[in-house]
Image (cartoon, rainbow, N blue to C red):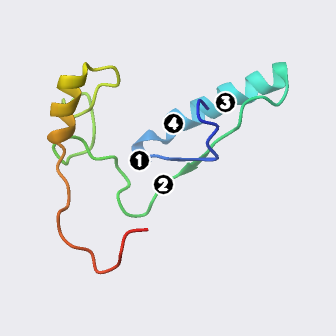
Amino acid sequence: MLFSADKIPVGEDQVQHVEITRDIAQKFNRQYGEILKIPATVIQKVGKNVPGLDGRKMSKSYDNYIQLFEEPGKLKKQVARIKSDSLRRKLPKP
């Protein structure tokens, strides 16, 4: 809602968070008028789960997540730990 997005890409296991946000926005709009945009959930067929820092499903239980308000130095280290696919693609990225 902060960015007035039309669509929110999430992992399959995170849909409930967008649904709660939608419910809150709808109740707010009923009370105060059409102020907040109601986002739609988008789940890609490939990569249904959001990968964590170690490539597994992102989870606090696995301690492989990025803290939102981390100090810049620690945040940089966390981002540098993210496993990525370095294989070349046949098609250019959009």
Q: Say the numbered circle drawn on residue 79.
A: none
Q: CA distance from mark 4 to mark 2?
A: 12 Å
Dot 3 alpha-carbon crowd within 10 angstroms: few under 14, some 14 to 19, many 20 or more: few
Viewport quadrant of the C terminus: bottom left
Q: Nearer the viewer, residue 41 or 90?
A: 90
Sequence order check, earlier mark of 4 and 2: 4
Kind of residue at badge 3: Asp
Whichever of labels 3 and 2 marks the residue nearer the N terminus, that label is: 3
Q: What percent of the width, then of the height, locates residue 58?
A: 28, 39
Work out how far the residue at label 4 is from the one at label 1, CA to CA, in angstroms. 10 Å
Assign a secondary structure to mark 4: helix
The residue that appears at 45% across and 59% down in the rendered structure is 44
**Residue 90 seen in the current view:** yes
Residue 89 found in image quarter: bottom left
Which residue is under mark 4?
A: 16
**Is label 1 in contact with label 2 (beta carbons under 8 Å)?**
yes
Q: Which residue is mark 2?
A: 43
Quarter of the N terminus within the rendering:
top right
Disc sitting over residue 23 in the figure:
3
Query: Which residue does the numbered mark 1 point to in the structure image?
Result: 11
Left or right of residue 76, residue 3 in this image: right
Disc 3 or 4, which lies upstream in sequence?
4
Q: Amino acid at mark 2?
A: Ile
The amino acid type found where label 4 is placed reads: Gln
